[in-house]
Amino acid sequence: KQWYQRRVIANEFNKYFASIASNLNEVYSGDYLKINPIPSFTDYLPKSISSSIYLKECECQEIMDIISELKSGKSSDIPIHVIKKSSTVIVPYLVKYFNKCMQDGYFPCELKTGRISPI
């Protein structure tokens, strides 16, 4: 007899579980149940200290090393071989520009965007 009542048993389970939410809503519909708001993830982060970071100024050699490691396959508006060949001329200006941006706390909008290219 149990094999023939599978559908009845399944329907009874369905009625029970489908009614749980409405039954809970009826029971807890009063103002006595206070639900605390869900905390933001930032509530769990330690408080930041704005004066706790130290960045040293970049130097010409540091920028030269970065340029020398650039690969030609990377997406760029300027061909990498042109950047490498002109590095001795442009590096001092880049160093001044980067250091000034760091001192002023300024991050140029042009550096906030990226180009995505398929491989």
Image (cartoon, helix red, strand yellow):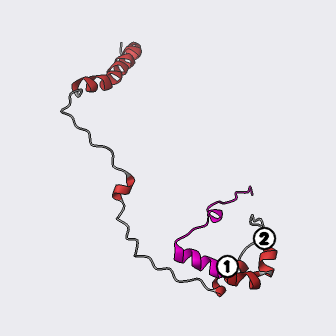
**Quadrant assignment for the C terminus:** bottom right
Indicate the position of residue 71 as horizontal and vertical percent values.
75, 72
Q: In the rendering, which numbered label is found on residue 7? A: none
Viewed as shown, does residue 34 lie left or right of 102? left
The residue tagged with tag 2: helix, strand or loop? loop
Label 2 sits on residue: 72
The residue at the point 66 percent across, 87 percent down is 61
Q: Which residues are magenta?
A: 95-119
Q: Earlier in the sequence, mark 1 or mark 2?
A: 2
* Closer to us: 119 or 32: 32
The residue that disc 1 covers is 94
Q: Is residue 65 above or below residue 27?
A: below
- Assess whether residue 64 is covered by the magenta stretch: no
Classify residue 34 by image quadrant. Answer: top left
Residue 13: quarter of image: top left
Q: Nearer the viewer, mark 1 or mark 2?
A: 1
For the view shown, which residue lies furthest in the left direction? 32
| Element on which disc 1 rests | helix
Relative to 57, does residue 42 appear above or below in the rendering? Answer: above
* Mark 1 crowdedness (10 Å alpha carbons): few <14, some 14-19, many ≥20: some
- Answer yes or no: do the residues labelled 1 and 2 have beta carbons within 8 Å? no
Say left or right for 72 vs 110: right
Where residue 8 appears, x then y in whole percent? 37, 14
Disc 1 marks a residue whose amino acid type is Leu
**Residue 15 located left or right of residue 116:** left
Residue 3 in view in this figure: no
- Which residue shows up at 52% across the image and 71% down it? 105
Determine whether, in the image, residue 57 is placed left or right of residue 33.
right
Q: Residue at 40% of width from left, 17% of height from top?
A: 6
Q: For the point 77% across and 76% down, which residue is it?
A: 83
Residue kind at label 2, given as amino acid type: Ser
Q: Is residue 26 visible?
A: yes
